[in-house]
Amino acid sequence: MHSFVYRANALLTFAVTILALMCAMASLSDNFNSPSPTAEVQVLNINWFQKKPDGDDEVSLTLNISANLQTLFTWNTKQVFVFLAAEYETPKNALNQVSLWDGIIPTKEHAQFWIHTTNKYRFIDQGSNLRGKGFNLTLHWHVMPKTGKMFADKLAMTGFRLPETYR
């Protein structure tokens, strides 16, 4: 006969193996989800566009951000981190990214939203490269699952341009 400790060890090992197998299946099942989020960003106003005393350009924008990210949520989604970035090119760098706004979406019910805001973080370029510069506003998201690897993607909106002169 096997002792109580031996039987408890066998039962615990079996339970942990089944739990690991269920976690792996849950993580793999998310690969079959094909999300189709939508977003739209409007620049309502350029509040100010100035050259700071240290020579850097700074911009303040008023934005309308609307998005429907509900398709990112599955039963395995814990939360979604989302942020809006201004992306542009300069002679020094092929890609400059400046985060303007961010948020954490805890549930599917909160994943459809409309926000009227100014940029939460300062839109500053190191140098005088922003005058007349075209830029994209890109909505990035990172899906944080309960189990498995994180998934990240983005949606770029093009056609935005800053003025030629400071105001």
Image (tube, rainbow, N blue to C red):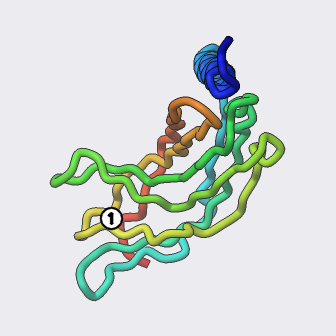
Name the residue rendered at 62%, 61% in the picture: 63
State whether residue 33 appears in this view: no
Q: Answer with the quarter of the image where residue 20 lies.
A: top right
Instruction: Write the residue at 71% across / 63% down.
Output: 116
- In the displayed orientation, state which residue is furthest to the front: 1
Residue at point 35%, 65% (across, down):
164
> Please, which residue is most extreme toward the bottom here?
53
Q: Nearer the viewer, residue 22 or 101?
A: 22
Q: What quarter of the picture does the C terminus occupy?
A: bottom left
Numbered-mark total: 1
Seen in the picture, residue 125 relative to 159 is either above or below; the reply is below
Q: State the residue in front, 44 or 69.
A: 69
Instruction: Residue at the far right: name it.
Output: 109
Q: Position of residue 127 (x, y in %)?
A: 23, 70
For mark 1, does the 10 Å Cα neighbourhood hold few (<14), some (14 to 19), or many (20 or more) residues?
some
Which element carries disc 1, helix, strand or loop? Answer: loop
- x, y (%) of residue 7? 67, 20
In the rendering, at what x and y percent does residue 99 appear? 46, 59
The disc labelled 1 sits on which kind of residue?
A: Arg
Kindly identify the residue that appears in the image at 67 percent across and 34 percent down: 38
Q: Quadrant of residue 101?
A: bottom right
Residue under numbered circle 1: 131
Which sits in the foreground, 104 or 21? 21
Residue 165: give x, y in percent of width and height. Answer: 36, 71
Instruction: Say which quarter of the image contains residue 29.
Output: top right
Residue at the top extreme of this rendering? 1
